[in-house]
Every structure is written in structure tokens, then in C-alpha cells.
Amino acid sequence: MSWRDNLQPGSFRGVGFEVLSASARKGRRQALFEFPQRDTPLVEDLGRRAPTFQVEAFVLGADYMAQRDALEAAIEAEGPGTLVHPYRGELQVCVLDHQTMESSAEGGYAAFSITFVEAGDAATPAVTADTAAAARSAASDLSSGSSATFSETFTTTGFPAFVPAAALSLLSTLAGAYAAAASLTTGAGAQLAAFATANAVLTSAGESLVANPPALASAVTAATMALASLTSTPAQMGLALLPLVTWGGDLAPVVATTPSRQQEATNQEALVILVRQAAAVAVVEAVAGEAFASYQDAVDRRDEVAEALDVAALEAADAGRDDVARAFTTLRLAMVRDVTARGGSLRRLYAYTPAQTQPALVIAHRLYDDAGREAEIVARNRIRRPGFTPGGQALEVLTNG
């Protein structure tokens, strides 16, 4: 019996050959650590070693040269290919190296010694959109655009004294609104002093500001940002800043019967839009930095802010300011995408009613097997006496995990 009678068929990239013998090498990757004065080494397992397959292949016959060239072309082609292994079936492999030996004996043949290595799928990192950054970017775009638009439309230069006087009156009203909003926060110390200074500028430097629209826009933005810095909790942000997103709705309209009155009306509209947009920017930036405890918390904040931005957009559209309406809508969409994306995977809230009065510590252990989460239950439900949490009353708690 000739050695040719023992050959088994195989192929690589569809090019056939005959196999006399094959071997495989497998194992684990290990990192060996040997320490001074210690007899026992430490071996750290770094994962499975890439399997290699050694194949002794032949192409035979009078036309073996054409078969040899085809197999060499398959071996040298870029990327992984399918190896039909006579003993292991189909494998996705790459070629590490190969050797070729040719002989004219027994009708002529070419012998290949080929080393294949397993080819895994390329690990593609998961791509996650930074929706918070996108929301901040939309807020930044609106902030820069609103200041430029305000400077182009607001002016008191060359108009009768009642036009700048009306603008000063608006600044006084705005400063009062900012002060009222600040009273709803717990800001103190340097932050409160910075806000008081920024807010006082609106009235103390009012005459120079109404004559310099870019400076006025900067002053309003600075006061809004200073107010935002006083809000230490999301609840305070909602109380203090959200009303400013729709500020000015109760201002008396200006009857534009003359060019001067028309400019007075334009100035009032420009200042209202500037304040609303500055507040909207502050709100969206605050929401982008907010870490939500639950899915419901995220949805509540999203809907609260979206409603205020919707009102501002609708009022701008009703006033014929489609550009302003689009700006509010763009900001709203960016905020909604951000909060929806970040809140979607968070834990849900559900109602749990303890059967009897017991410590919140016991409830935390029962629900989560973690007594350390007592503070979470107490804070969310505003429990006054954690040692005696009333039975028969529903508590708002987070799902576990």
C-alpha cells in the first residue's frame, strides 16, 4: 500500500489538497510570578491561547503545478479564510506561515507544511452616543445665537426718553423676578454674594446697559447663570429656573402706534426672549449634569422641562417668531433624547406596603438584603422616624438591581 492511499481530502479558501497528517496546539496563556524567599510561584491565567493547526498537505499529479500555484495564492491572500480540516471540520483560520517542498518522484507532487491559527471575530467596541454632551452643545449654540440676535434687535439710541425708560423699568421687573427665584433656593456664601452682585448690576448699571445691547445681553446671561448656581437640588432648579423659561407672559403689551412705540415693543419682546433662552440654557445644562436615581425620576424631570420649553416655543410661534420657536424646539429635542437615553436603563419605582410598623433598616434588609439602603428609603419617602416606619402605608421604593 502506497502512502498516497492514506491521504484525506481537505481545502482552504475552496482550493483542494490531500492531507497525510495534521496536529493541533492548544492551551492557556499564563503569567508566572516568582517571588524572593517564597517557594510557591503565582500563576495568573490570562485566557485561552489561540489554537494553531499544523497541516501536512499535498497536491499531486501531472498538473500539480497549477494546483500548487492556486493553493499558494490562497495561503498568501489577506485576511481569514475557511479551512476544511479532514479531522476537525470547518474552521475559520489565518495562515501564520508555510513551507513548500516539491518532488518529481511518483508522478510529481508539492508538499505543504502549513500552520493555521484560529481567527475570531473582530471585537468592535460598543458605540454609545454622548447625549448629555449633545444637549450641552445645543444649549451652547442657543446661548451664543440668542445674544447675537438680541444685540441686533434691541436699541434705545436715537429714540425719545420714554423708550430707554421703558427698558429700565423692564430691567427692574426682571431683577425682582430673579430675586424672588433666588429666595426659593438654599444658595449661600460666595455663590449668593455672586448672584446678588450680578442681579444688582441690572438696575445699578441699567442706564449704561440699555445703551449697550451686547453688554445688556451679557449681564442678563451672567445673572441667570449666577441664579442657576444657587440651585443645589433638582427640585430647586424646577422652582427657581423653570418659571423663567416662560417669563414675561404677564407683562403689559406695548401698543405700537408710532415708530418709537414700535421700538419699545421690539425691545420688550427681545428682552423677554433673551431671558427665556438664558433660563432654558441653564435648565438644560443642569439636567444634562443630573444623575437620576430611577427611571421615573428621569421621566418626571424630562416631562417637566419639556413642557416649559413647549410653552416657550408655542408662544414664540404665536408671536410670529418662528426662528425662536425652532430654537426652543431644537433644545427640547436634545434634552428629551438625553434624558430618555440615560434614564431608560435605570431601576423602576414600585409601591411596597409594610404589614406592620417597623424600622426602615428592617425594610431595607428585607427588600434588598442590604440594610445600608435604609437612608435611600427614608429620604425618598421623607420618613420622620426611621425606627418606626408606619405599617399599612405604601412606600415608594426602587427595584433591586
Image (tube, rainbow, N blue to C red):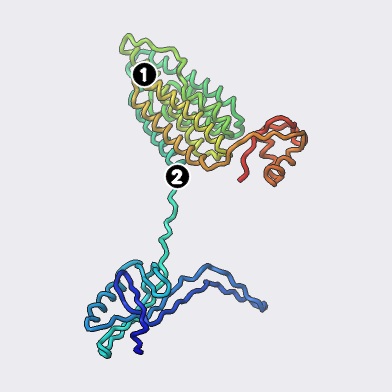
| Residue under label 1 | 319
Q: Which mark is residue 58?
A: none
Which of 265/28 is in front? 28
**Which residue: 36% across, 81% down?**
7
| Residue 400 visible from this viewpoint | yes
Q: Is residue 101 left or right of residue 268?
A: left
Amino acid marked by disc 1: Ala
- In the image, residue 85 above or below residue 380: below
Binning the other alpha carbons within 10 Å of mark 2 as few (below 14), some (14 to 19) or many (20 upward) gives: few
Q: Is residue 100 left or right of residue 342?
A: left
Amino acid marked by disc 2: Asp
Residue 182 is drawn in which quadrant? top right
Local secondary structure at mark 1: loop
**Which residue: 48% across, 24% down?**
202
In the displayed orientation, state which residue is furthest to the front: 1
Which of 279/152 is in front? 279
Residue 281 location (% of width, % of height): 45, 32
Binning the other alpha carbons within 10 Å of mark 1 as few (below 14), some (14 to 19) or many (20 upward) gives: few
Residue 168 location (% of width, % of height): 44, 18
Residue 208 location (% of width, % of height): 42, 23
- In the image, residue 66 above or below residue 320: below
Q: Is residue 380 left or right of residue 107?
A: right
- The quarter in which the N terminus is drawn is bottom left
Residue 32 location (% of width, % of height): 57, 74
Q: CA distance from mark 1 to mark 2?
A: 34 Å
**Which residue: 43% across, 50% down?**
127
- In the image, residue 89 above or below residue 160: below
How many discs mark residues in the rendered view? Answer: 2
First of labels 1, 2 by sequence position: 2
| Residue under label 2 | 130
Which of the two discs, 1 and 2, sits closer to the camera? 2
| Residue 156 visible from this viewpoint | no
